[in-house]
């Protein structure tokens, strides 16, 4: 499973990517929507983990653009938003497979990733 | 309660809510980074216990990151506290440069989301004014918000705090998008109400790409 993580918090996203790698998941990270779009030109990902509030380009818009390039790609949103219920509804409407509130529970994240790919 | 009074109160709550949401978002990000970094430290420790060779420097760097994020969260909370105390007294002496600096710090996340840079220039000396601190914060935010939109993505908004013959003022410069702004679009009633209360004035210089907020040095009658 190849995963692309997108969050403007560099120290957060790099640590999370390394933790996923330790758990056997190939994970790359970028800090902006623009970089994510560049990255998928040279590499294919099965899943993108997107922060909803990215600078300049929202996570929702990025999802749409990534999906245009790769219709098979799955999505998980994560956010620092306080209202999890509102966020859950928003994520479902945007067509994400799952949502996570920050701080992320790594075991839950890995479990959900495996569930999405029926492993 | 009159309709106008209700609208004014609501606008104040809206501003307080916007700032609180942004601040709490920032705190969540700092905590989430601490969570992942501490988690990574734990993962690496487990690998080390299983015999994987790891450089001690890695642990040192990660511990340093946690300390940096704790400092970041502490600064955010301090600013939140300063902002919350702006409602303590209806009228108070404040230093204009410091007030603007606080509002710019609180606006940083909004600026980052829009891809705009805020570049303040400190006044030559302290500029003390007697004002309504919460209303001043609110008006400054509305002006910064407008200036960021008028500057546009990828641009820089300059901010100059200065004492002039007409009183203390803040100039928002390099607003290239001002040309397209209609005079009936800004200031809106929300800004006008605050301008009245603060005995302040907003001047728009479209050609120079500047918004000038002229404040009263003392709003007491």
Image (spheres, coloured by chain):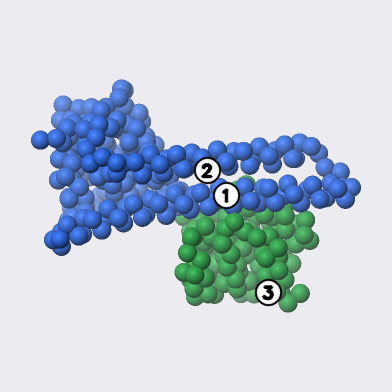
Q: Nearer the viewer, residue A49 or B132?
A: B132
Chain of the residue displaying label 1: B
What color was chain A assigned in the picture? green
Residue A83 visible in the shown view: yes
Q: Position of residue B185 (x, y in %)?
A: 21, 56
Q: Nearer the viewer, mark 3 or mark 1?
A: 1
Q: Which chain is blue?
A: B
Q: Nearer the viewer, residue A116 or A39?
A: A116
Q: Position of residue A69 (x, y in %)?
A: 59, 69
Q: Which mark is residue B31?
A: 1
Classify the position of the N terminus of chain B by image quarter.
bottom left
Q: Residue at x 14, y 35 (%)?
A: B220
Q: Nearer the viewer, residue A79 or A21?
A: A79
In this view, the residue farthest toward the right is B51
Query: Mark 3 Cα within 10 Å, few/some/many (few <14, many 20+)?
Result: some
Chain of the residue displaying label 2: B
Classify the position of the C terminus of chain B by image quarter.
top left
Q: Position of residue B193 (x, y in %)?
A: 17, 50
Mark 1 and mark 2: span between their CA atoms? 8 Å
Q: Are marks 1 and 2 in contact (CB under 8 Å)?
A: yes
Q: Nearer the viewer, residue A42 or B14?
A: B14
Q: Which residue is mark 2?
A: B73
Element assignment for label 2: helix
Mark 3 and mark 1: span between their CA atoms? 27 Å
């Amino acid at each position: 499973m190849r995963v692309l993580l997108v969050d403007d918090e560099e120290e957060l996203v790099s640590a999370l990517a390394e933790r996923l790698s330790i758990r056997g998941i190939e994970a790359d990270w970028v800090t902006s929507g623009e970089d994510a779009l560049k990255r998928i030109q040279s590499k294919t990902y099965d899943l993108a983990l997107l922060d909803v509030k990215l600078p300049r380009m929202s996570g929702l818009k990025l999802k749409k653009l990534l999906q245009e390039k790769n219709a098979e790609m799955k999505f998980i949103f994560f956010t620092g938003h306080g209202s999890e219920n509102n966020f859950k509804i928003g994520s479902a409407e945007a067509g994400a497979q799952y949502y996570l509130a920050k701080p992320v529970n790594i075991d839950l994240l890995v479990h959900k990733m495996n569930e999405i790919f029926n492993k | 309660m009159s309709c106008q009074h209700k609208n004014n109160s609501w606008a104040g709550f809206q501003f307080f809510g916007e700032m609180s949401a942004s601040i709490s978002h920032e705190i969540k990000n700092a905590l989430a980074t601490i969570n992942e970094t501490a988690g990574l430290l734990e993962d690496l420790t487990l690998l080390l216990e299983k015999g994987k060779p790891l450089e001690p420097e890695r642990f040192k760097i990660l511990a340093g990151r946690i300390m940096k994020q704790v400092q970041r969260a502490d600064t955010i909370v301090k600013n939140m506290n300063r902002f919350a105390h702006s409602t303590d007294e209806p009228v108070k002496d404040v230093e204009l440069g410091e007030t603007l600096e606080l509002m710019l710090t609180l606006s940083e996340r909004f600026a980052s989301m829009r891809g705009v840079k805020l570049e303040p220039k400190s006044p030559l000396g302290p500029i003390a004014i007697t004002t309504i601190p919460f209303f001043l914060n609110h008006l400054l935010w509305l002006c910064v918000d407008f200036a960021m939109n008028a500057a546009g993505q990828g641009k820089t908004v300059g901010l100059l705090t200065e004492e002039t013959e007409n009183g203390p003022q803040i100039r928002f410069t390099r607003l290239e998008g001002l040309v397209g702004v209609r005079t009936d679009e800004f200031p809106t009633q929300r800004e006008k109400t605050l301008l009245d209360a603060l005995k302040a004035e907003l001047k728009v210089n479209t050609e120079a790409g500047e918004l000038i907020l002229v404040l009263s040095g003392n709003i007491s009658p």
